[in-house]
Image: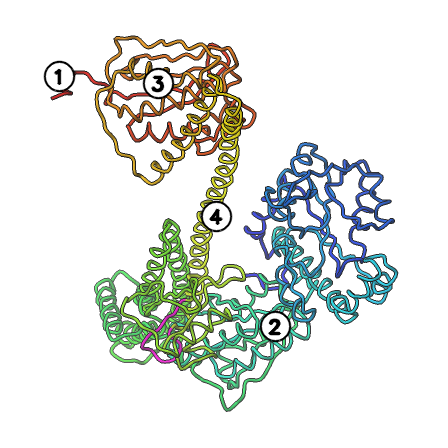
Amino acid sequence: MAAAGSGPGGARPDPDALLRAAAQEGRGRLKIFLGAAPGVGKTYEMLSEGAVRRRDGVDVVIGVVETHGRAETEALTRGHEAVPRRAVPYEGRTLHEMDLDAILARAPRLALVDELAHSNAPGSRHPKRYGDVEELLAAGIDVYTTVNIQHVESLNDVVASFTRVRVRETVPDSVLEMAEIEVVDIPPDELIERFKAGKVYLPAEATRALGHFFSKSNLSALRELALRRAAQAVDARMLDDVRALGLGGTWAGSERIVVAISELPGCDALVRAAKRVADGLRGPWTAVFVETPRAAHFTDAQHARVAATMTLATQLGGAVATVPAENVVAGIQSVLLDLRATQLVLGKSNRSRWFELRHGSVVDRLVRDTPDVTVHVLPMPAQVADRSGARSTGRRAGQRDTAAGYAVTTTMVAGVTALASALFQILDLGNVALLYLLPVMAAASLFGLRTGLYAGIASSLAYNFFFLPPTGTLTISNPENVVSVIVLLGIAVATGQLTSRVRAQADLATASARTNATLAGFLRQIAAVNDPDTAAQMICDDVRRLLDVQVVLLDRASGAELSILAASDPAYRLDAMDGAAASWAFDTGSPAGKGSGTLAASEWLFQPLKAGDRVVAVLGVASDRTGSPVRADQLPLLSSLIDQAALVLERLRLQGEMRDLEMVRTRDRLRAALLSSVSHDLRTPLTAVIAAAAELHHGATPELIGTIEMEAQRLNRFVANLLDMARVEAGALKLNIEATDLSDAVTGAAHDARRALEGHAVRLDVPPDLPLVRADPQLLHHCLLNLLDNAGRYGEPGSTVVIEGRNRFGELRLAVLDLGPGLPPGREGEVFETFRRLEGSDRAVGGTGLGLAIVKAFADAMGMSVEATNRSDANGAAFTLVFPPKLIVRDLVTEHA
């Protein structure tokens, strides 16, 4: 294993980093000009660099730039091509937004997009401008943009804490993480002078701003945040590039601290020391526990000690990790290499000289083998030093030594002695010694070091007693034979140590594979669930099965109190202390309850399930064991299960919100369409009726009476359509199915629709020999009336409307054909949606958008289908009612019977 600080040959490219680099192929590059406050010159700098790129031959356009009336900024825009903004009507006024589609169609090499955190006008494709930028990047267009530090999502609370102003428009940190960042910085005093000179705001506004948000202390703090956030972004990108290239070394662009903890008392002092180091160096820090084979033999107290230390690290703001490794040194070195750590904090226990001679010193090996890492060594207090580690080491070596092992070993030695005695006449002493290697190696491999040593001693004694002269005694006359005895013992020791090491590695690999398989199975099961209640119950059941604990999952829906969403046992009830601990975990996003540092009197340990910065639920675990309900060696598995469960619950929550949002949008669209339709389709006939009624004062004429009748019928038909649609949506349709003659149905509908078809010729092409169909005559009549009304409304004046009936391939088709522009290709099915009038077609004007929706609803209710297509023989649309074979009457006698 390569240690931190090894050369390039000791490391390999990180697959995750390579995947992230591959994902950027074909995408545009994002550069963010980051400032501490308005007026530092972000837009000016962006335009200046854009001008340099344009002079270098790069195709540059301005997507959107806000000059705020600054003359020097406006001067820089004059040399650039600017894509015109699109006008968006909103609440009686017109907003002008960046025209994303126009930029995509223009396809420049570089687009300049100001104010990344801007909220787009309602109805835009993306609610935020960074969504527009993401689409430009996905199209392969480079983007230069600007943002102030107070708009960064993760710093929102920090900025609000000292400015007393919470910024509503924020940008996710993930956007900054994929960008190159350039800090545009000027000293606070110089920026204040710009404010006073009116170069940022108008003088009156500038005076007010300087007294509140943009005071000198606030500007200094914002400047520090901007510089620090840029340094973090640069460091993260540098580490990603280093991992992708597989380069060794710490690459200490900034400080990264690791603290190694163990089961020994006093490790909490190491964590606090690491926190102080991290605060002083302003760097991230991680607490690491190396899980060696010895951890399998920890006592409950030792497990609880590790869990408490890791909980403390989390509470102090550090990251935690558990790393399986063959030994402590190898585990720490792997973490240092992976994190590219520059500082290591660890403790030195009060060990005896004899212990260090036998086992070596972890501190000395790390200092010697990690030259690029600064090592902080803290002495562990002598009064709390724990020898359990040394005793565990001894137990590990002999963990497989049992009475059965000694018995089997004795039998093997006796068997080899008998075999060697039988073959002694043809074997020399050297070959007999080789035979005794068999029980030594077998015992050491199968039963451990102590049994191997026993086999070596027993084999040496048997070899000496039965075969070395003088036989029958334990005296060795030939000094050369002493070598054979020593070799047997040496092989026993070497084989036992080697076997123990291989077995430990195999155990670690098996444990890692088991954990990965567990997580994969857990995620596979709950990822396929679309019901939140089912997913919650599966989470509880799986966590209980995997960790052997009692589990409860709590959520806060609309009320202020947490409620149990699911539990491994439905009979679980939480008392007041448990409820307080659960509420604390949900509100603060930190663990609470038994084994934690908060409300430890509770019988439950509550862990928050986080998705981003939001707590989606709280998972409570409890057990009968003392200390923490979850052992330290189970904490990584629990943490992974919690992360996966949080992602699944957040996905289900978002799916539910999207469904609710879609319902609201549909309801709002229907409401708006209904109001539009009612205002138009009621006002038009009412106007005609009122005008005709006014003319009646001068005497009634047949034309006036006809107008009143026609418009009243139009009103009646409109109200009937509204009532029919309400019946359909309420499921109140009552069918009266009977054998129906289509010729009669078509003739009757054409007669009743004569006013709607006025100005059109009507041609009935329905053969009289068509079979009867099973249908509701009244609903079928409504369908035909609406189809004919639609044809009369949208057909060209003076054109012919055709009603055509055909019996083909076992199904009967009744079509209404008009002559007009037709329907937009690929969108024919949309005409059957409620209140839908397609733009760019003959269905775009007039009508309520209800008639065809009613036709489809009635047809579905009767078991028919309806199709909308463009005519193949002429311009126009064709609407066809399709009667499947089951609705065609084959035997009229049987039908009436």
The CA distance from mark 2 to mark 4 is: 50 Å
Under mark 4, the amino acid is Leu
Q: Which residues are magenta?
A: 619-629
Q: Position of residue 414 (x, y in %)?
A: 23, 70
Q: Secondary structure at mark 3?
A: helix
First in residue order: circle 2 vs circle 3: 2
Of all residues, the one furthest to the front in this rendering is 698
**Are the two marked residues, 2 and 4, in contact with CB atoms closer than 8 angstroms?**
no
Image quadrant assignment for residue 189: bottom right
Q: Secondary structure at mark 1?
A: helix
**Residue beneath label 1, please?**
893
Q: Which of pointers 2 and 3 indicates the residue nearer the eye?
A: 3
Q: Position of residue 520 (x, y in %)?
A: 40, 54
Label 4 Cα crowd, 10 Å radius (few <14 / some 14-19 / many 20+): few
Label 3 Cα crowd, 10 Å radius (few <14 / some 14-19 / many 20+): some
- Asked if residue 539 shows in the view, the reply is yes
Label 1 Cα crowd, 10 Å radius (few <14 / some 14-19 / many 20+): few
Q: Which of pointers 1 and 3 indicates the residue nearer the eye?
A: 3
**Residue beneath label 3, please?**
749
Residue 628 drawn in magenta: yes
**Are the two marked residues, 4 and 1, in contact with CB atoms closer than 8 angstroms?**
no
First in residue order: circle 1 vs circle 3: 3
Q: Which of pointers 2 and 1 indicates the residue nearer the eye?
A: 1
The CA distance from mark 1 to mark 3 is: 27 Å
Q: Residue at x 47, y 47 (%)?
A: 664
Q: Position of residue 445 (x, y in %)?
A: 34, 65
First in residue order: circle 4 vs circle 3: 4
Which of the numbered marks, if any, corresponds to residue 661? 4
Of all residues, the one furthest to the bottom in this rendering is 383
The CA distance from mark 2 to mark 1 is: 96 Å
Q: Which of pointers 4 and 1 indicates the residue nearer the eye?
A: 1
On screen, residue 28 above or below 357: above
